[in-house]
Image (cartoon, helix red, strand yellow):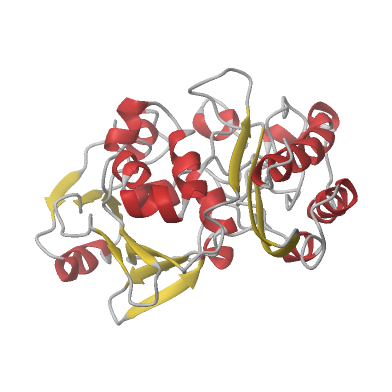
Amino acid sequence: MMPFVYRRAASIDEAVRLGGEDGSVFIGGGTNLLDLMKGGVATPQRLIDVSRLKMAEITELPDGGVRIGASARNSDAANHPLIRTRYPLLAQALLAGASPQLRNMATVGGNLLQRTRCPYFYDIAFEHCNKRKPGSGCDALEGLHRNHAVLGASDACIATHPSDMCVALAALRAQVRVRGARDERVIAMSDFHRLPGDTPQRDTALEPGELITAVDLPRSPFAAHAHYLKVRDRASYAFALVSVAAALDIADGTVRDAALALGGVAHRPWRVPQAERALVGRPLSADAMQAAADAALQGARPRPHNKFKVELARRSIVRALSVAGGLA
């Protein structure tokens, strides 16, 4: 691990000021960042500790939504009464991630900033990784890419986003609140993570020095019909091959609204509003679910080792919607 300067921020304003200095990185629970530093993948000059700031509260908003502070631990968020009763989809996704020990340390803000688990990114012995070393190439293109993206990838990067929490937040149309040197702004979850394009080293829409302060969840009609399905190689402590966050608002047998997002298949949580619209205004049927799956996977471009992901995702979407809708 390279030497670094450690600073503990006493306030959000101080954190933003310190975070704006070149080479500075915020640290909360450290469950991902410290691994990257130990492996030589991340080499920050300064760590700005924001774990002691008053950003851990989970509170109800005046409009019936919920605000989750960025420093809230994943385990606390998953087990909070407001999350369990109003957003069971998010609680399920949080509990599907990592292990209890890691969930007790990991923060909501840090979870949003997880880096990919692509082995070519994580191991500096592999020279060609555009995400780690821009312009060097992508060893995954011709290497082992069974776990890699089938949607939204580019010739520069085919890595996938690893978070379970973020898939649920995308489906629930959350918003991320961030504080910068000049002001506070709100970023829709659909815009927070970037596709790789020609600049895969940029994972998010955050500007340098911006600090995540909270995640806002809008009032939700999906509490009664929600399911998070995670398909992985082993039953626990494994990243998703494919995951599906599915939730429905059903009245008198008709779907009034739908939420659908995929994980494990793209550089960011994959939400296609057209897939949700395929379910709305009609009974939840096999044809409707298949139409939603087809819309969600339109444009998929698998590579030789991960072709199975397309059919796996299609079946997983139907399964998740069936469970959410009470048909399975």
Does residue 184 sit above or below 286 in this rendering?
Answer: below
Res. 33 image quadrant: top left
Taking depth in this image into account, of 305 and 130 the one nearest to the observer is 305
Q: Is residue 84 left or right of residue 142?
A: left
Can you give x and y, in whole percent of width and height, for residue 310 in the image? 82, 38
Identified at 19% across, 63% down, the residue is: 15
Residue placed farthest to the front in the image?
252
Identified at 52% across, 43% down, the residue is: 132
Q: Is residue 129 visible?
A: no
Quadrant location of the C terminus in the rendered image: top right
Quadrant location of the N terminus in the rendered image: top left
Q: Is residue 97 left or right of residue 199?
A: left
Q: Is residue 320 left or right of residue 214?
A: right
Identified at 63% across, 20% down, the residue is: 233
Taking depth in this image into account, of 316 and 38 the one nearest to the observer is 316
Does residue 107 sit above or below 271 in this rendering?
Answer: above
Taking depth in this image into account, of 266 and 99 the one nearest to the observer is 99
Can you give x and y, in whole percent of width and height, for residue 203 in the image? 53, 54
Can you give x and y, in whole percent of width and height, for residue 315 in the image? 80, 36
Q: Is residue 294 visible?
A: yes
Q: Is residue 146 left or right of residue 132?
A: right
Taking depth in this image into account, of 305 and 140 the one nearest to the observer is 305
Does residue 124 sit above or below 91 in this rendering?
Answer: above
